[in-house]
Image (spheres, rainbow, N blue to C red):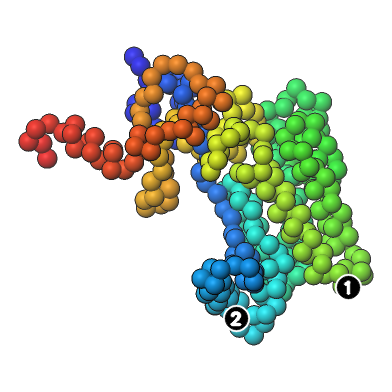
Amino acid sequence: MRKTIADLTRGIYDHGAHADLADRGYRRYHPFSFDFDSTPLNLAEAQEHWDELVKQNHRENRAQTVKRLEQRYGSTDIESVVKNVTDLGSKSMSLLAYHNQFHEQARRSFVAGLYYPALVAACALGERILNHLVLDLRDSFKSSEHYRKVYRKESFDNWTFVITVLTDWKVLIDGVGSEFLMLGELRNRSIHFDPDTYHSLREDALAALQRLNAIIAKQFGYFGLQPWYIDNTRGAQFVKRAFEDVPFVRAYIIPRSGFIGPLYGMDLSQGGWHHLDYADYGDGELSDEDFATRYRERDPEKVVSRAMIEKAQLEAKPEGGA
């Protein structure tokens, strides 16, 4: 019997049942669960070389953004709020995971001028991310020399050790380990008593949040040239076939992905965005490069849409059926 996504209880999202799909060779995992905030971009001043219409639209958007900030943080210190948001910069696009809520809380503390809570929160979240990575992934590395040192522990506070372990396991993307080490230096200086903290509180909080944002963008991001994504698929990311069994990808990316072919569509309905796709692409095997080419060159008329599905359902109804 030929098995397709139409036979699965959760179809595109039935991750445990995708291995033996008949058309598996045509499909790749497409993550579509993300968090980001580009508010700081709206607060930039209009550039003189812009067209007048563009300037006017930007000024209106900026005024609306400032008004929303006033509603959230109050009008008393709105100039400081605007400066804090601008200096903080955009929150990079990230997979939805355990870190998003706490990251947002730390950023809001900084925007509100609560610099020490923001600093401590950023450092604490850095440690939480390190702990999650080890605890969530360690069972995939039982043959590692590090496993006996980590398999019984429930938490870790030695950042250098944890970063070494994750680096040896090839979990961390290039550059993430050094970002963690620099954030760790801020943590040690800020959380353990150091009188100089009083004089550099805002500066340290901003640096910690920017380090944290860089870590999240590189490790959990979408468009940062992460090694597990197929190249040359502008506007979307798809997991390379060879990376589907990589522990980090299997734990964090695939559960937030749809298993789709190159003609998939997206539908916004109650509860957010969902994938739409054909039930069966047929026999064969696409390389990652072939998949990227088919995605780039796909015929818009063949991309699955809600209207297409509803039309097919209507045509499939027996004559005189309800």
Q: Which residue is mark 1?
A: 199
Q: Quadrant of residue 148?
A: top right
Q: Residue furthest left?
A: 320
Measuring 55% from the left and 21% from the top, which residue is drawn there?
287
* Percent coordinates x, y for residue 97 in the rendering: 59, 47
Q: Nearer the viewer, residue 124 or 172?
A: 172
Q: Residue furthest top?
A: 1
Q: Quadrant of residue 103?
A: bottom right
Q: Nearer the viewer, residue 119 or 191?
A: 119
Q: Is residue 288 above or below residue 59?
A: above
> Mark 1 Cα within 10 Å, few/some/many (few <14, many 20+)?
few
Q: Which residue is mark 2?
A: 74
Measuring 51% from the left and 37% from the top, which residue is drawn there?
30
Of the residues shown, which amino acid type is indicated by label 2?
Gly
Of the residues shown, which amino acid type is indicated by label 1?
His
Describe the element under mark 2 as helix, strand or loop: loop
* Percent coordinates x, y for residue 118 in the rendering: 73, 65
Measuring 82% from the left and 26% from the top, which residue is drawn there?
145
Q: Nearer the viewer, residue 83 or 77?
A: 83
Describe the element under mark 1 as helix, strand or loop: helix
